[in-house]
Each structure stands twice: as C-alpha cells, then as structure tokens.
Image (tube, rainbow, N blue to C red):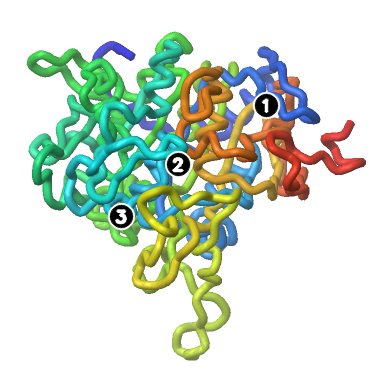
C-alpha cells in the first residue's frame, strides 16, 4: 500500500485511550455479518491485525506468573481467549514459515537459520512442501499468504518495529533482508542491538523470494513508525498514520514487535517503551508495555470499529523458562531461599495438536530444541482475539495451531483457488481435517458491539471429534445452541 509520508509518533495515555476505545465498542453498533455460530461460517471481518509475540507457554502468559496483567486479564475481557492454541515447532523461524506459507520445520529454520541462505535443493515435495535439507530462504515458487492477498487485490502491510534503525544491518527498503542469500549466504543474520532491536527471523517477508524479489511487495514491508523518502524510494507511512482512516488502513496487518517488545529478551538491549532509559526489563513485562501502546490505537481506529479483528499470537512455547532467562516469575510455591522452588510445568512446551505432520525435512517438528527432547511440536501458547464478532469474555478450549491460523485467514479473505488442495490452502493449511476458526471464536454473528466482560464469562468446552472436519461441536443447551 502506497501511503503519504511518515509523521511524528503520536503519544497517548494508554489507559485513557483503552477506556475510550472500549466505550466506542459499546456505542458503535453499525456493521453486519453473515455468520452463524452453529454452522461455523466466517463473519464479514474486513480488517485484521495480527501481533506475533515470542516464546511463552500458556502457563507463563495467562496464569499470573509474570508482570503482564494487560495481556493476561484486560485483553481477554474484550474478546476470546484460546486456551489450546499451539505452535508448530522450535525455535522461532520455523513457526513463522508455518504461519504464512504452511511449511513444516526443516533443519536450518528450526535452528533459527544460523546462515541466511537459500534452501537446498528447493525442489517441490508432497503436500505443498519444499525439500529443504539446508538453508532457510524459499524459492519464488513457494507462495505465502501475502502472495495470495496480492492475487485477490487485498491490501496488506507488514509493520516491523525498529527495522532499518541501523541501515547497514538490514535493508528496510527491501523487505528487511539482512543481505544476499545466494551462495554461501550471510552468517549470523542479526540479533538485537541497543539502537536496533529488529531481528530478521521474526519478519516472514525476508524468507521468501516470492516477496523479497518483488519491489511492490517490499514497499508494503515497513518499520512500525514508517519510512522517510530516500533516493529511488517514496516515503512509507507507519501504522499510526495508516489507522487514521478506513481508506488508508490495510485489510491485513502483520505486526512484528522488536526483540524487546515481543517478550523474547529477558533483558532488553535497548528501549522497552517504559520511558525510563535505565529500565531494560524484557519478557512479558515489555510486551505488555508494547500492547498497551498499540492495541488502544488499533481499537480506536475507524477500521477496527467497523469490522476489525485483533489477534495476539505467540510463535512457540518455550521450555524451561528460568534456565534460559526468558521470563520474570517462572517458579511456583516457595521463595528461592527455601530451596523448594520448582519450575512451572514445561510439558506445555513440548506438545502438538491437530494431527500435525512432520514434513519431508525432519522426523519430528521441533526436534531436540534446547538440548532436550521437545517433540512433537511447538507447545501450547494460547492466543487472544478481539472483534465485534466475538463475545467479550469468551474462552475456547478447541485446539488450533499455526496451520489452522493460515487456513482461517485464507478463508476469511476469500481465497478459494490454488494452493495445495486447489481450494486456496497452502502447505499444511490444506491438511485433511484441519479446522479453521469456527463458531467458538466468531460467536457474535450479529456484530453488535458488547461491553467488556470477565474472561470465562462464556466458555466453549467442546473439542472437535474425528468426524468434525470444519465446524465447531455445539453442546446441547450451550449459549451457541440458541
């Protein structure tokens, strides 16, 4: 999307804006949907914002163990908490590739690609997969959700916080790539620094030639706060400016926070948005600060008020937290001096759902990450979804994973042709029996705006059976059966 020039960041009181946004959700009742919670039809959501956070099991994020009450308590009261949302592998990069292209983990991408180089041999494999015995950058023949949106003429943008702060590290005008992946590639493609906490492994556009070789697509991969004009490059607006009107808001927005704001780093290399230059606390504390800034901006926007959906998703569950310094409060029970402290249940970090397939390149997704047996998948992370088409306070225990997310987005934006199954689903998003988000998530088909409610006010305990290939099971007598 071509946008006007970058403008100064607008600083607002997050708490006040959150209240005003909530009030707007209550009083704004325009808009319709063609959803039926009993039949799993998708409502007419017109704008989606997906925020990807890093490396936390459900128990770390949604149990009160860490300093993240905004994500743990406040945001689920505006929408739905998905208690059985799963990653697809370990470490990070393989999950991003699953999300946007349906690709299964492979040796180098499940090691976060120590060298930025093309996959080899890069030949087609079954089920829309690619043979990738080494390397991480996929050939132009490997399509992504963003390519599908291009084909449907659906405007999209990737907003990557801090991208381009240090131009010699990554090219902000070329999809944020860290260099040339041909030949021997680029060793150590980038970690956070005090002035630039962007990391390429959290930006999906950098790993597909179908995007990075296309200047028009790269024009839609911008820093969160936009790009100034440069020789041969027009200015690109940031998210805050784009949100000012429905016309300038992309239909699909992918938001990649930097390595501090996404909860990845326990101690941030640079700014954590606290306003205190001496405060570098990271983890879920830092991600809460980020969410408290951007979520109210989105909720107050005309596009969200009309037909928006906000998704907060984690890439993977991370075991065990304290060993890797990844969270703040990860131990239960007793004070450290007692010697009786025990880590939280790391079993949530090493499970899969939804009959996840391993793919052609590894025997098990997420295999042997962190020096321990982490098969078979990416663990339980949980997710939060907020929309006028979702009843506030809802909780769903229906299992979903990143392939489910991709299939859901393809269905939501009307991608019905091509893909692995000929019906618009890429890679393992086309797997038989995989369920997209159903009536347990889109449970307010009228789109009538409702006030916030405590999480758990509405629960969806049912889990789909083997014969339920695409619709939620509606328990007799439940709120969804009326």
Residue 392 in picture, x, y percent from top left:
69, 37
Q: Mark 2 or mark 3: which comes first in sequence?
A: 3
Q: Residues within 10 Å of mark 2 (few under 14, many from 20)?
A: many
Q: Earlier in the sequence, mark 3 or mark 1?
A: 3
Q: Which residue is mark 1?
A: 389
State the image coordinates of residue 292 (x, y, percent, origin top left): 46, 41
Q: Quadrant of the N terminus?
A: top left
Residue 227 in view (yes/no): yes
Between circles 3 and 1, the one closer to the viewer is 3
Query: In front of the other: label 2 or label 1?
Result: 1
- Residue 318, percent from left and from top: 43, 61
Q: Position of residue 415 (x, y in %)?
A: 52, 19
**Quadrant housing residue 10:** top left
**Where is 79 relative to 66, above or below?**
above
Residue at image location 41% in from the left, 63% down from the top: 327
What residue did someone put label 2 on? 291
Residue 379, disc: none
Residue 289 can be seen in this image = no
Find out whether the residues at labels 3 and 1 contact each other: C-beta distance under 8 Å: no
**Going by the picture, which residue comes out furthest to the bottom?**
338
Residue 293 falls in image quadrant: top left
Q: Which of pointers 2 and 3 indicates the residue nearer the eye?
A: 3
Quadrant in which residue 124 is drawn: top left
Label 3 belongs to which residue?
107
Instruction: Say which of 249 and 355 sits in front.
Output: 355
């Amino acid at each position: 999307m071509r946008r006007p020039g970058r403008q100064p960041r607008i600083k607002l009181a997050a708490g006040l804006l959150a209240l005003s946004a909530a009030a707007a959700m209550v009083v704004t009742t325009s808009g319709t949907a063609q959803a039926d919670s009993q039949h799993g039809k998708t409502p007419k959501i017109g704008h989606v914002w997906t925020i990807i956070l890093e490396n936390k099991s459900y128990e770390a994020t949604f149990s009160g163990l860490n300093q993240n009450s905004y994500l743990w308590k406040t945001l689920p009261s505006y929408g739905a908490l998905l208690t059985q949302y799963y990653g697809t592998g370990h470490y990070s990069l393989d999950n991003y590739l699953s999300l946007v292209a349906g690709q299964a983990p492979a040796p180098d991408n499940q090691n976060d690609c120590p060298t930025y180089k093309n996959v080899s041999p890069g030949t087609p494999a079954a089920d829309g997969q690619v043979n990738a015995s080494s390397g991480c950058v996929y050939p132009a023949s490997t399509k992504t959700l963003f390519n599908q949106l291009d084909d449907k003429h659906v405007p999209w943008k990737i907003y990557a916080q801090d991208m381009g702060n240090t131009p010699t590290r990554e090219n902000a005008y070329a999809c944020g790539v860290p260099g040339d992946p041909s030949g021997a590639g680029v060793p150590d493609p980038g970690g956070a620094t005090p002035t630039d906490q962007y990391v390429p492994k959290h930006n999906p556009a950098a790993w597909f030639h179908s995007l990075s070789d296309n200047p028009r697509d790269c024009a839609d991969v911008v820093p969160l706060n936009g790009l100034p004009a440069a020789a041969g490059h027009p200015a690109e607006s940031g998210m805050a400016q784009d949100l000012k009107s429905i016309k300038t808001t992309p239909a699909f927005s992918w938001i990649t926070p930097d390595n501090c704001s996404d909860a990845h780093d326990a101690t941030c290399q640079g700014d954590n948005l606290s306003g205190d230059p001496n405060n570098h606390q990271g983890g879920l504390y830092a991600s809460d600060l980020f969410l408290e800034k951007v979520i109210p901006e989105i909720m107050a926007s005309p596009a969200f008020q009309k037909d928006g959906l906000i998704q907060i998703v984690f890439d993977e569950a991370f075991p065990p937290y304290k060993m890797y310094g990844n969270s703040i409060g990860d131990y239960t029970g007793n004070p450290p001096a007692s010697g009786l402290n025990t880590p939280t249940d790391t079993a949530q970090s090493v499970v899969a759902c939804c009959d996840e397939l391993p793919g052609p390149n590894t025997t098990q997704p997420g295999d042997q990450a962190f020096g321990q047996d982490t098969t078979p998948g990416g663990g339980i992370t949980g997710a939060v979804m907020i929309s006028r088409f979702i009843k506030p306070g809802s909780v769903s225990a229906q299992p979903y994973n990143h392939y489910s997310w991709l299939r859901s987005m393809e269905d939501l934006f009307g991608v019905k042709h091509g893909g692995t199954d000929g019906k618009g689903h890429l890679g393992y998003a086309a797997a038989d029996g995989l369920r997209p988000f159903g009536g347990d998530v889109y449970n307010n088909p009228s789109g009538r705006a409702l006030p916030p409610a405590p999480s758990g006010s509405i629960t969806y305990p049912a889990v789909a059976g083997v014969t339920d290939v695409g619709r939620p099971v509606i328990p007799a007598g439940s709120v969804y059966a009326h």
